[in-house]
Image (cartoon, rainbow, N blue to C red):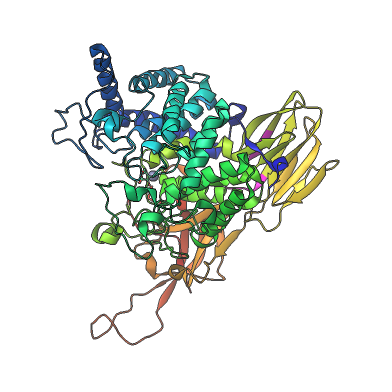
Amino acid sequence: MNKADYNYPISLRKVQITDDFWKKEMELVRNEIIPYQWDALNDKVEGANPSFCMRNFKIAGKQNKERAEKGNSFKEPVYTFRGFEALPEDPDNLEDKFYGFVFQDSDFYKWVEAVAYSLTQHPDSELEKLADEAIDIVCAAQQEDGYLDTYYIINGKDKIFSNLRDHHELYCFGHLAEGAVAYYQATGKDKLLKATMRFADYINNYFGPEEGKCKGYPGHEIAEMALVRLYEVTGEEKYLNLSSFFVEERGQRPYYYDGEEHPDIKIEKGHENDLRYFYNQAHLPVREQKEATGHAVRAVYLYSGMADLARLKNDQSMYDACETLWDNIVNEKMYITGGIGGTHLGEAFSYPFDLPNDTAYAETCASIGLVFFARRMLQMKAVSKYADVMELALYNGILSGMALDGKSFFYVNPLESVPKACRLDERKWHVKPVRQKWFGCACCPPNLARLLSSIGSYAYTEKEDTLFVHLYMGSKVEKEIGGQTAVISVEGEFPWAGTVRVSACGCDSEFTIALRIPNWCRNYTVKGTDGATTEVKDGYLYVTKVWKEGESVELSFPMELRMLQADTRVREDIGKAAIMRGPIVYCLEEVDNGADLHLLQVAKDGAMEIVDRDIAGTKVKAVTVDGYRKAAAKNAGGGLYHEYEEAQKEAVKLQYVPYYTWANRGENEMQVWTVTE
Ligand code: FUB
Ligand code: ZN
C-alpha cells in the first residue's frame, strides 16, 4: 500500500445525481421511506409493531428533567432486564419503561443519517426542522456525564456495559456517530455531533489499553468505523486510538465475553466451531483471521473498520488481513447477487461454498456492509475488483431489499422461493415470499435509506488531481483542481445500456479521470481521447488531459447476455445456469413462466434476447431464453419412485426479469439458478 494511492469519497454536497435509475431510488427514499420511517419511529404505522424508538428517548429525557428538578443526578438503579423484544401487555396503557429491542435507538440514528444525505441533494426546510426537533428530544435524553443509551438510562445505569456481547450500546453509539457526522456535514449543525463527542469521551474514559480501563469491545461492530469518521471530522486522535483499541482487542484471550453474563442468549460451549467466538469474529486476533465468519453484518462492519484503520495508520498487515477476508468472501461465500450470509442460524456466513438458494439469509444489511467494506478498500487502492462487487451488490442483493414503489422491504434475499415452503417448512420461515411493510427488528429499511441517499459517495472518490468513477450514473461532480472548480458530467443509461459520456468544464489545468472497466465487459471501446494520456491500471482507464468544454470521452461497455455457472464446489448450483446482463442478475418468476419453476430447463446454446418490459410501472430490460418445461413423470403403477426414463419436455421461451424486481407482482415462485438441459 502506498499513501500516494489513497483517495477519498466526494462530499455529497459536491455531487448531484441526475440519473433516471438512481434518482428514482433516491426520490423513493425522500418521499416514501423517510416520512414512513418517521411515522414508524413514532409508533404511528397502523398494523406494524410499535417501534417505541422516539418514545424511549422522550421517557429518558423526562426522567432526566425530573432528576434535575429534584437536584438528584441519577435515579436509583433499578435494573429490570427486559429481553430482546419486550412488547407491552397492554399497548394502550404503557408504563414509563423502555420498550423494543435493546438497539432501538439506532433506528433514529439511521433515520437522521438518511435525512442528512437527502438534504444534500434536495434541501427541504420542513424536513430539516423536523430533524432538528427530533435531535432536541434525543439530546435531552443524554446524561450529564455524556452517557446516551435509552435502554440503560431507563432501566438503570448500574448495568451499563455489562453485556457488551449482546446489548448493543456500542452499536447504538456507532450509529449515533454516523448520523451525527452526516448531519453536521450536510447542515453545518453540530448539536448532535457535540452530544456524540460527549458520549465518545465517556466511552473513551471507560475502555482502553490503560490499566484500570475495561478491555471489552463491541458485540456488534460499527463503532470501529464510526469512531474513524468522528476522528476525521473532529481531528481528535483519541477517537482513532479508541477504534484501534476495539479492533486490536477482538480475538485476544482470555475471551472477554466469557467474563460477562448473558441472560438472553446462551450459546453452547465446546462446539467444534465454537460459536461463542466465531459469531462475533473474536476467534482470532483480527490480523490472523483468514475466513469471514459469524454474523455477516457484524463481520463486514468490522472489516470496514479494519480497512479504515489500515488506511489511516498505513498499516500493511491490516490491509493484507482485509484483502484476505475480502477475497475469501468473494471467492467462497458470496451469492451471485452480492448477497452474503448463507445461513439464518446466527444470520451468518456458512462454511466455504455453502450457498443454498432457498434457505439463503443474504440480509439486505449484510450486502450494504459489503459495499461499505468495498469503498474503504478502494480508498486505499483503486482496484476494480472492489467496485465490481459494490456494483453487483447494489443492483441486485441490495435493491431487491425494497419494493419498486419503496413501500415494502425484504430483510432476507433468497435466490429461490416457493411461497408454500416459506409457510410450511420451518427451515424457511425466515424467507418471506412478499416484502413486508416493516419489521420488529427494523435494521434493513433504514440502512437502505442511508445507503441509497448517499450513493454519490460510493460512485466517486478523489485524490488531488484524479477523480475516480467507480459506478456509472448520470451525475455532475464538482472537483477542486489547482484553485479552480472543475464540473465533471457523467451521462449514460446504466444499467440498461453500456455507453457512458464523460465531460468536464471550468478548469484550465490538466487532470485525470479514472474510469472503471467493469469485469462483466469483455471488450470495451473508447472515443474522444485524442491528445490525452491514457493508461489502464488495476481495472481503471486513466484519462489525463485538459478537459475542454464541449469535448467528451465516450466509453462503450457492450452489455452482452451472459449465461453463468457456479464453481462446482457450490453443490446447490451444479448443473444449473444463471443469466446476467451487465451488472444485472436475472430470475424467473411464476407470474411469467407458470408454476413449478423447478421443471424448467434452460437451453445451453439457445437464443437469448433482450426485451423491453414494464414491471409494476418500472421500465426494465428483460430477457427471453430458449428452454424447456419437463412434463411431470409419474409412475404408472403409482408410488413415488419409478424406473429412470428420459423426461418428456416441451420447448418454451423462458421469461427472465431483473432479480431486484421480483415479488412486485404478487406472491409467486422465483428462481435465479435454473437447470440446464
Ligand atoms: O443486531 C442489530 C441488527 O439486527 C443486525 O445488524 C441485524 O443482522 C439484525 O440482527
Ligand atoms: Zn438488516
**Residue 248 in picture, x, y percent from top left:** 50, 46
Q: Please say whether residue 590 is visible from this viewpoint.
A: no
Ligand 1, by image quadrant, is: top left
Q: Please say whether residue 575 is visible from this viewpoint.
A: yes
**Residue 537 in picture, x, y percent from top left:** 74, 51
Reply yes or no: does residue 69 show up in magenta. no
Please give left or right for residue 529 compared with residue 350 in the image.
right
Please give left or right for residue 540 compared with residue 576 in the image.
right
* Residue 37 in the image: above or below residue 268: above
* Residue 598 in the image: above or below residue 101: below
Front-most of 612 and 413?
413
Residue at 45% from the left image edge and 29% from the top image edge: 200
**Residue 269 in picture, x, y percent from top left:** 31, 60
* Residue 606 in the image: above or below residue 245: below
**Residue 84 in picture, x, y percent from top left:** 26, 42
Front-most of 84 and 470?
84
Please give left or right for residue 66 compared with residue 514 in the image.
left
Front-most of 384 and 323?
323
Task: Name the residue furthest right.
Answer: 531
Reply yes or no: does residue 493 show up in magenta. yes
Count of residue discs: 0
Residue at 47% from the left image edge and 46% from the top image edge: 249
Residue at 54% from the left image edge and 57% from the top image edge: 330
Image quadrant where residue 638 sits: bottom left
Task: Name the residue furthest bottom.
Answer: 643
Q: Give the range drawn in magenta.
A: 489-499
